[in-house]
Image (tube, rainbow, N blue to C red):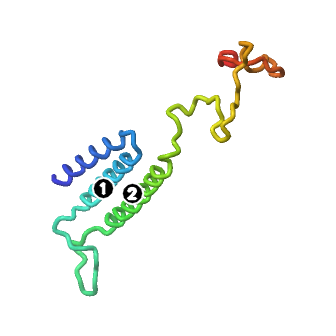
Amino acid sequence: MSAAVLVTVLVAGGVYLILQRELVRAALGFVLIGHAANIIILAAGGQRDREPAYVGEGMPTDGLSDPLLQAFTLTAIVITFALTVYLFALAGHGGDEDGKNSDAEPSDADEDHGTVVDAPSTSGEPVGTTSTGDQPTGRTDGKEHA
């Protein structure tokens, strides 16, 4: 019963953190869900009143815990650690280079050289090409190409 409550709390906290906007919080949410998965795997083995899964010479083999579940848990720990390191690396690398809020919209100035890339036409004509694509006509509002 206590493992079920612990798993419920860990999964609830993990889902809450994954749904947050920041990548560090999402990574911590994956850590919590990874811990919950480990507890589920270990609880499925019925660890109560069982001996460690080590058989020495002359020891009885009945009443030993299942070593396969322990191997699964170790594998889950390694996978959770790798995912956590990867997400923290993404969070640490991309912090300063996110750009403006709207990267989908092109800017009028080239940020590398400080020069104007697409100067607006002074004649009031749309910038673009004709329907055949061979002659520039000026500035467009985007409806011509849709």
Q: Is residue 39 left or right of residue 92?
A: left
Q: Is residue 99 left or right of residue 52?
A: right
Q: Which residue is mark 2?
A: 80
In front of the other: 22 or 116: 116
Furthest toward the top, the residue is 124
In front of the other: 70 or 114: 114
At 48% from the left and 51% from the top, the residue drawn is 90
Q: Is residue 101 left or right of residue 3?
A: right
Image quadrant assignment for residue 54? bottom left
Question: Please, what secondary structure does the residue beneath circle 1 have?
Answer: helix
Measured as percent of width and height from the top left, residue 121 is found at 72, 18
Lower sequence index among marks 2 and 1 = 1
Amino acid type of the residue tagged 1 in the rendering: His
In front of the other: 57 or 122: 122
Amino acid type of the residue tagged 2 in the rendering: Thr
Where's the C terminus, which quadrant? top right
Q: Is residue 133 left or right of residue 63?
A: right
Q: Which residue is mark 1?
A: 35
Measured as percent of width and height from the top left, residue 67 is found at 32, 69
Q: Tell me how far mark 2 sits from mark 1, CA to CA.
A: 8 Å
Circle 2/circle 1 CB separation < 8 Å: yes
Give the answer, above or below, for where 96 lies relative to 143. below
Question: Please, what secondary structure does the residue beneath circle 2 have?
Answer: helix
Give the answer, above or below, for where 59 lies relative to 89. below
At 19% from the left and 70% from the top, the residue drawn is 50
Measured as percent of width and height from the top left, residue 83 is found at 43, 55
Tell me the number on the disc at residue 15.
none
Rate crowding at label 2 as few (under 14), some (14 to 19) or many (20 or more) other CA atoms within 10 Å: many
Rate crowding at label 1 as few (under 14), some (14 to 19) or many (20 or more) other CA atoms within 10 Å: many
At 46% from the left and 52% from the top, the residue drawn is 92
Measured as percent of width and height from the top left, residue 115 is found at 69, 34
